Structures are given as structure tokens and as C-alpha cells.
Image (tube, rainbow, N blue to C red):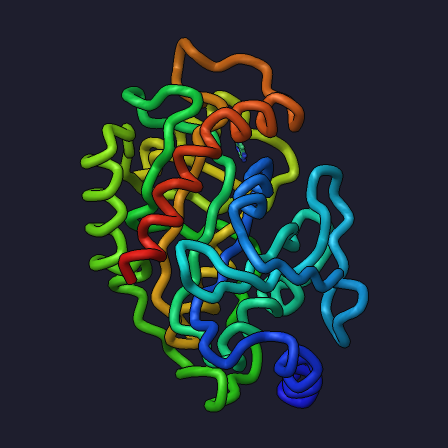
């Protein structure tokens, strides 16, 4: 793992400016944020040594090197989901790469179903905390001290200062920003009504099939995390309707400019 990681990083290093400290994972239907990135250089995943390659529809796989909000950034267009068959080391490999490139921040976006009764489709939720319900843990197995500690504290997974900054930017610009707990599940099925209810009872506000593994590894690697969910459907009793991947992508597209705005402003003010 360490040897392959070093090979990936030394291959990428000359293509990514040393000052780059911000990594962004663009989730389902949120790839449009890539349009705001300037001085772009694209690196397809399949050209990167040891990098997994993404398969699912709507997720094109490439790294985008460039500038956002006046800062150098590296964005992942297309992430690796556990439900696609990748193991957790593959799902989180890009975050390890960011760690070894010396990054300080990870920004993450995803699409999620809302269980909170005050949410509406198209809302953006600032992730305050998460519940990890994936059946495999990204840190399971031998721990390399060079990657992080064996027993990781998770009392503050989502950075408080970044969250405050995001909330104040949303407030000043009249963007409705919800906040809550993200439940991470393996998918690929969406939830049954009973499952949405169960996730609500255990303390969840939104549920999705990503983010939690990447956030755990980012924290293990010492990166500060800011993450958002776009609420693309509702798992709220009485409001549950059929949900398809296409509808999720459509809803995410509509909310995307607001989220892109918040993210870019946060980056400007870092
Ligand atoms: N459940 C799980 N993942 C999702 C959902 C959902 O309702 N919506 C978007 N991603």
C-alpha cells in the first residue's frame, strides 16, 4: 500500500503545484462545479498509476488541477463507491494520495435522501456529523503509522471553523442551508420506508452511499473536512415516492449552483 501510494504520488507530483492544499470530491450530478475551475488541466484516472477507474453512469473519472476562488485546488470528478465493487482501500485511495501530496483540506459533496421532516428536495445540508453503517471499515487491517494513528478520534469529524464559515456565507447570501447528520450506507438500493424511518430514529437527517469512508481516511490523514449533501429525494413518512438515479441527478443539478457558490466562497476566504 505505502509503496504503491508513493509511486502514484511521485507520478502526480510534477503535475500539481506545490502550493495546492485543497482537494475536492465532486459527487453525483455535482460535476458542474468543475466549470468554475480555471487554468484547468485534466488527468484521466486510467492514466494514473495504481488509481482505481470509475464505472457508474454519470461519473466521469478524472482529476482536475486548476484554480477555484483564486486558490490552487485538485478536484476529483467521479468518485469510487463501495457498491461498485471496490474495496475500502480503493474507495479511499484518492484521499491517501491527497494526504501524501501534503493537502490540508478536503471538501466533499454528495447526493442524499432526506429523513428530516423540515427538508425539501433541492435543499443543501451541511454535514455536521455522520453515522457509519458501511459493512467494511477503511482503516481495518494493519495500521501504518506513516498514514495515521491506530485508534482514531472521531469526536470532531467535520471542521467547526469551516462549517461556521460556510453557514455565514450562506446566511449573507440568502441561501437556505440545512444542517444535520449523514448516514452512510453501502447501497446500491435506495431505502425502504422502514429503513428511512430507522435511519431517522437513530439520529440521521440524510442518507447516502458515499462520503463516510473518504471522511474517515481524511481525518486519519489529518485533513480538515467540509462536506455537503444535496437532498435529492425525501424519505419522510407520507412524502416517500419512487426514486431513480436519473431523478437524483436532476435534483442535484438544480441545487448545484448554490452549493458551488458556497464552496467557492469558503475557498476564497481560507
Ligand atoms: N438513499 C441513499 N442514497 C441516496 C438517496 C437515498 O434516498 N438519494 C440520493 N442518494
Residue 250 in sight in this render = yes
**Residue placed at 62% from the left, 58% from the top?**
40
Vertical order, 72 against 4 (above or below)? above
| Quadrant of the snapshot with the N terminus | bottom right
State the residue lying farthest toward the front.
39
**Residue placed at 61% from the left, 63% from the top?**
88
**Residue placed at 49% from the left, 64% from the top?**
73
State the residue lying farthest toward the top.
238
Q: Picture coordinates of residue 212 (x, y %)?
A: 47, 54
Q: Nearer the viewer, residue 23 or 66?
A: 66
Vertical order, 228 against 269 (above or below)? above
Q: Picture coordinates of residue 203 (x, y %)?
A: 30, 39
Vertical order, 31 against 61 (above or below)? above
Vertical order, 191 against 99 (above or below)? above
Q: Picture coordinates of residue 66 (x, y %)?
A: 55, 62
Total label count?
0
| Quadrant of the snapshot with the C terminus | bottom left
Q: Picture coordinates of residue 42 (x, y %)?
A: 69, 60
- Judge from the rendering whether residue 21 lies leftward or rightward of residue 50; answer left or right: left
Residue 199 in sight in this render = no
- Judge from the rendering whether residue 188 lies leftward or rightward of residue 238; answer left or right: right
Residue 118 sits in which quadrant? top left
Q: Nearer the viewer, residue 214 or 260?
A: 260
Residue 160 sits in which quadrant? bottom left
**Residue placed at 80% from the left, 64% from the top?**
46
Amino acid at each position: 500500500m505505502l509503496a504503491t501510494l508513493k509511486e502514484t504520488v511521485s507520478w502526480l507530483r510534477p503535475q500539481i503545484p506545490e502550493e495546492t492544499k485543497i482537494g475536492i470530491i465532486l459527487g453525483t450530478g455535482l460535476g458542474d462545479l468543475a466549470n468554475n475551475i480555471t487554468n484547468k488541466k485534466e488527468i484521466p484516472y486510467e492514466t494514473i498509476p495504481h488509481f482505481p477507474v470509475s464505472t457508474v453512469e454519470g461519473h466521469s473519472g478524472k482529476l482536475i488541477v486548476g484554480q477555484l476562488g483564486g486558490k490552487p485546488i485538485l478536484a476529483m470528478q467521479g468518485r469510487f463507491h463501495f457498491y461498485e465493487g471496490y474495496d475500502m482501500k480503493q474507495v479511499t485511495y484518492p484521499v491517501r494520495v491527497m494526504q501524501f501530496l501534503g493537502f490540508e483540506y478536503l471538501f466533499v459533496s454528495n447526493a442524499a435522501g432526506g429523513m428530516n421532516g423540515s427538508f425539501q428536495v433541492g435543499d443543501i445540508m451541511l454535514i455536521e456529523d455522520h453515522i457509519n453503517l458501511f459493512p467494511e471499515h477503511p482503516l481495518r487491517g494493519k495500521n501504518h503509522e506513516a498514514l495515521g494513528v491506530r485508534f482514531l478520534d472521531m469526536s470532531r469529524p467535520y471542521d467547526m471553523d469551516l462549517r461556521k464559515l460556510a453557514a455565514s456565507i450562506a446566511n449573507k447570501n440568502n441561501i437556505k442551508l440545512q444542517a444535520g447528520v449523514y448516514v452512510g450506507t453501502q447501497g446500491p438500493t435506495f431505502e425502504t420506508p422502514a429503513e428511512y424511518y430507522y435511519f431517522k430514529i437513530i439520529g440521521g437527517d440524510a442518507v447516502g452511499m458515499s462520503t463516510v469512508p473518504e471522511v474517515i481516511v481524511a481525518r486519519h490523514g489529518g485533513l480538515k473536512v467540509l462536506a455537503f449533501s444535496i437532498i435529492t429525494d425525501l424519505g419522510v413518512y407520507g412524502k416517500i415516492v419512487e426514486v431513480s438515479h436519473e431523478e437524483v441527478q436532476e435534483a442535484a443539478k438544480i441545487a448545484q449552483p448554490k452549493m458551488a457558490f458556497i464552496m467557492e466562497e469558503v475557498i476564497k476566504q481560507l
